[in-house]
Image (cartoon, rainbow, N blue to C red):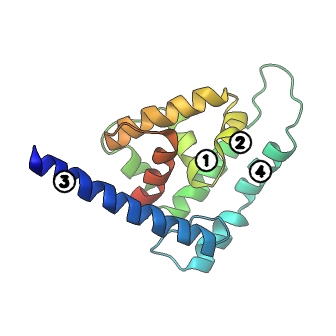
Amino acid sequence: MKNESLKRRVEVLEYIIRTQDHRIALLENGGQVVPRNRPKEYGKLALTNDLAIKRLRKIVNHPPVRPEGVPLVEESEWQALEDTMEQNYPTLYTRLHENEKLSESDYRMCLLILAGFSPSAIALLMEKANASISTSRKRLLLKIFGQEGKPAEFDYKLRFFLV
């Protein structure tokens, strides 16, 4: 019991330190997550200036009116996002699918989180309710990391998991 308590305290302190380091990195890089194994300039430019991410940001900022049944984000745009993120995080697919196979929807949500989209933007792009996105993030925290917690914890853990 005492060892478990001490182990949990160490985990919490390590999490706080990583979170603080992450916040500092975000401030230094204008809000962009930069993989640690690449130069800061490369990561910032790759994610900020990537055409796939720019197109998705345009959809978020100015959602097009589409006939019912026509998805807001086309398959080619999802594929472009996947290609971009896998270039920046080469082990992305493998590491996310290590323990358990993710659904396509879960994987896309992870891509959008890593690309820096807010939960409300993710909800819009995936055409789901905000509450559904929050629930999915909590479920993914348990599924991928084996921990219960708040949806925002999943976002932080996902970013630290890959860098």
The label nearer to you, 2 versus 4, is: 2
Q: Position of residue 26 (x, y in %)?
A: 59, 67
Look at the numbered disc 1 and give the secondary structure of its residue: helix
Q: Nearer the viewer, residue 93 or 134?
A: 134
Q: Dot 4, crowdedness within 10 Å: few (<14), some or many (≥20)?
A: some
Figure check: 10 above or below 129: below
- Tell me the kind of residue under disc 2: Ala
Q: Does residue 41 appear left or right of residue 60 in this picture? A: left
Marks 2 and 1, Cα distance to the nearest angstrom?
9 Å
Look at the numbered disc 4 and give the secondary structure of its residue: helix
CB contact under 8 Å: marks 2 and 4: no
The label nearer to you, 1 versus 3, is: 3
Q: Nearer the viewer, residue 139 or 97?
A: 139
Q: Nearer the viewer, residue 98 or 28?
A: 28
- Tell me the kind of residue under disc 3: Lys
Marks 1 and 3, Cα distance to the nearest angstrom?
32 Å
The label nearer to you, 4 versus 3, is: 3
CB contact under 8 Å: marks 2 and 1: yes
Say which label, 3 or 2, has the lower sequence index.
3
Q: What residue would you read off at disc 3?
A: 7
Marks 3 and 2, Cα distance to the nearest angstrom?
37 Å
Figure check: 154 above or below 32: above
Q: What residue would you read off at disc 1?
A: 112
Please report the residue visible at 71 percent of the width from the left and 54 percent of the height from the top. 52
- Tell me the kind of residue under disc 4: Arg
Say which label, 4 or 3, has the lower sequence index.
3
Say which label, 2 or 4, has the lower sequence index.
4
